[in-house]
């Protein structure tokens, strides 16, 4: 039984080493909620909300997450114990969407559960791999030269694939230039919903670059137009923003809207739902990979644990801590060496949180008592 004593919700701000630009805007720093669930025996489990301060990626924000946690999600967990983390998403089922808020506390409960059972989180999830292959997501730079330099460093670091952010006006020409300089590097592009079917002829030009996939070219809430686009291009489409549930996944796969799924734990409401989507994709022969949201070490640790499941065939976005942070909030920090992360075998998320560092980065703290 997991009987919670309290949940501490910290509002954390971490400086990014350098700005990160997508089709929808630029991140200069990372503000997020860090959750610590403490049970009656004093054991702590850690979770991270991947909601950003502004709703430009999907609709959730740091503040909507605070609201949902405070008024709905935490009260339902604090008043009644649970036997297994799978029950968290069941208990949250009457509450529509708000998946990032749900996932933040569910992740903390999974960590707590694994610690209480004396096992690493990846084993609690039935993960199989002891090391995972990872890629890197690279933001839009101001000049072609800058973009090529950043890619060159990432290739030198050994990442297994390079993901480039694209947008109208920064797509075909830059990809041609990148391909010319890196003819054999596994390359993909992420549009973060910057196009529509009006751009269909334009997007066909991407087929010449041998991309492993194009991620979320069309609207954040679309699966219909993506099916039309997928029929017109040979580059596999991967859906990110459009996938919030197993049902979204089933519909996208059945309609032929994509050939690959990006699973982000926060976007789909937690690890239990991520596993369900993973299992369905495995049955269907659809490759999956784990997306990133500029996470701190706690979120990274959850991504690593999930990626140990067998259908995570393609390298994900979980790069080294040092790709974004001067100092991460976990110890040791996450290290990808030649594009490989060794899965930690300590209990729970497998990394120690550094409470002093967390304290330094915390702007506000709220405590919710059972
Ligand atoms: O679409 O995958 C995305 C970052 C912020 C918002 C959306 C996305 C991303 C990334 C970064 O691509 C991935 C990472 O390194 O964490
Ligand atoms: Mg994406």
Image (spheres, rainbow, N blue to C red):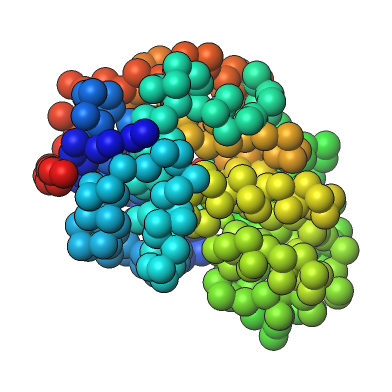
Query: From the viewer's perspective, is 105 left or right of 236?
Result: left
Query: From the viewer's perspective, is 367 left or right of 203?
Result: left
Viewer-proximal residue among 175 and 315: 315
Residue 232 position (above or below residue 77): below
Residue 80 x %, y %: 28, 48
Question: What residue sits 71% from the left and 80% below the top?
Answer: 225
Residue 342 x %, y %: 59, 17
Which quadrant is home to the C terminus? top left
Does residue 182 appear in the picture of this structure?
no
Viewer-proximal residue among 41 and 228: 41
Residue 220 x %, y %: 55, 72
Does residue 207 appear in the picture of this structure?
yes
Residue positioned most to the bottom = 198
Query: From the viewer's perspective, is 150 left or right of 329?
Result: right
Image quadrant assignment for residue 165: bottom right
Question: What residue sits 50% from the left and 21% below the top?
Answer: 120
Image quadrant assignment for residue 149: top right
Which quadrant is home to the N terminus? top left
Viewer-proximal residue among 278 and 147: 278
Question: What residue sits 58% from the left and 40% below the top?
Answer: 317
Residue 336 position (above or below residue 72): above
Query: From the viewer's perspective, is 244 left or right of 262?
Result: left
Viewer-proximal residue among 199 and 346: 346
Residue 336 x %, y %: 57, 22
Question: What residue sits 87% from the left and 63% below the top?
Answer: 234
Residue 61 position (above or below residue 322): below
Residue 227 position (above or below residue 345): below
């Amino acid at each position: 039984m997991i009987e919670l004593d309290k949940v501490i919700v910290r509002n954390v701000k971490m400086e990014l080493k350098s700005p990160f630009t997508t089709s929808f805007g630029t991140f200069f720093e990372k503000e997020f909620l860090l959750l610590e669930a403490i049970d009656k025996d004093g054991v702590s489990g850690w979770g991270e909300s991947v909601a950003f301060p502004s709703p430009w990626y999907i609709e959730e924000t740091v503040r909507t997450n605070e609201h949902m946690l405070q008024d709905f999600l935490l009260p339902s967990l604090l008043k009644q114990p649970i036997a297994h983390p799978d029950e968290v998403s069941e208990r949250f089922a009457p509450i529509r969407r708000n998946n990032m808020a749900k996932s933040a506390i569910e992740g903390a409960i999974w960590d707590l559960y694994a610690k209480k059972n004396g096992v690493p989180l990846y084993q609690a999830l039935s993960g199989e791999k002891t090391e995972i292959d990872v890629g890197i997501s690279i933001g839009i730079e101001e000049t072609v030269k800058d973009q090529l330099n950043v890619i060159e460093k990432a290739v030198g670091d050994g990442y297994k694939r390079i993901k480039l952010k694209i947008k109208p006006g920064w797509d075909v020409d830059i990809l041609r230039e990148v391909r010319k300089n890196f003819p054999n590097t596994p390359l993909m592009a992420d549009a973060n919903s910057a196009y529509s079917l009006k751009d269909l002829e334009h997007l066909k030009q991407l087929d010449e670059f041998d991309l492993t996939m194009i991620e979320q070219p069309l609207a954040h809430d679309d699966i219909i137009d993506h099916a039309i686009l997928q029929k017109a291009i040979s580059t596999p489409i991967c859906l990110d923003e459009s996938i919030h549930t197993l049902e979204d996944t089933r519909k996208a796969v059945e309609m032929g809207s994509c050939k690959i799924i990006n699973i982000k734990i926060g976007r789909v409401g937690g690890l239990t739902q991520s596993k369900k989507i993973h299992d369905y994709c495995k049955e269907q022969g659809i490759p999956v990979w784990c997306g990133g949201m500029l996470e701190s070490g706690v979120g990274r640790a959850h991504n690593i644990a999930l990626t140990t499941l067998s259908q995570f065939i393609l390298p994900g976005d979980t790069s080294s801590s040092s790709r974004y942070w001067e100092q991460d909030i976990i110890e040791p920090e996450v290290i990808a060496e030649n594009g490989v992360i060794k899965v930690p075998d300590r209990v729970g998320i497998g990394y120690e949180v550094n409470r002093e560092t967390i304290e330094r980065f915390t702007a506000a703290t709220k405590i919710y008592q059972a």
